[in-house]
Amino acid sequence: MTSPAAPIKIAQPSTVKDDFTYVVDGAEIVLPSLSYLKPGLVRRIRRLGDVDAMYTLLELSLTPEALAVLDEMDPDAYHQLLEAWRAHSGLSLGES
């Protein structure tokens, strides 16, 4: 007689539930964690390409004032903000 097989457990990626907060020129930018998006946001961006999805997420999540601050950011500083948001959310770009 064999013993019953142990249940298979699939490792779930860890999620970061806390919002990402970043200050740019004195303005507070608050974005949802990329690993814990609300279903409505996922539904709105599900068929978009990566770039369109990111900008749609920014437009749906930020106030008009915060968007105006992002629009005027130095491109290098903007990319640092995006990288910090990704890192905060616990997402990895993976190996290439």
Image (spheres, rainbow, N blue to C red):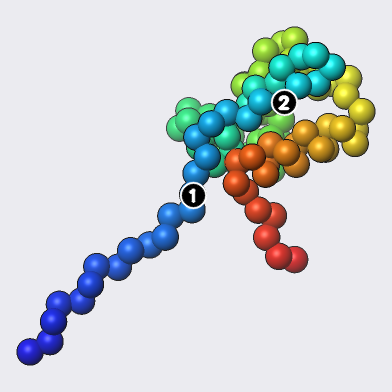
Mark 1: which amino acid?
Ser
Quadrant, the C terminus: bottom right
The reply to whether dot 2 and dot 1 touch (C-beta < 8 Å) is no
Dot 2, how many residues are within 10 Å of its Cα: few (below 14), some (14-19), or many (20+)? some
At which x and y percent is residue 38?
A: 48, 30
Mark 2: which amino acid?
Tyr
At which x and y percent is residue 57?
A: 64, 29
Q: Along the horizontal axis of the image, is 87 left or right of 76?
A: left
Does the rendering let one see residue 75? Answer: yes
Dot 1, how many residues are within 10 Å of its Cα: few (below 14), some (14-19), or many (20+)? few
- Label 2, label 1: how many angstroms apart (C-alpha)? 22 Å
Q: Along the horizontal axis of the image, is 20 left or right of 69?
A: left
Quarter of the figure with residue 84: top right
Quadrant, the N terminus: bottom left
At which x and y percent is residue 3?
A: 13, 82
Quarter of the figure with residue 55: top right
Which residue in the structure is indicated by mark 2? 22
Classify mark 1: helix, strand or loop: loop
Please, which residue is most extreme toward the bottom here?
1
| Residue 94 vs residue 42, the one in the foreground | 94
| Residue 93 vs residue 23, the one in the foreground | 23
Which residue in the structure is indicated by mark 1? 14
Quarter of the figure with residue 64: top right
| Residue 96 vs residue 77, the one in the foreground | 77
At which x and y percent is residue 46?
A: 55, 39
Q: How many marks?
A: 2
Q: Along the horizontal axis of the image, is 93 left or right of 80?
A: left
Query: Up-down: is 1 above or below 70?
Result: below
Classify mark 2: helix, strand or loop: strand
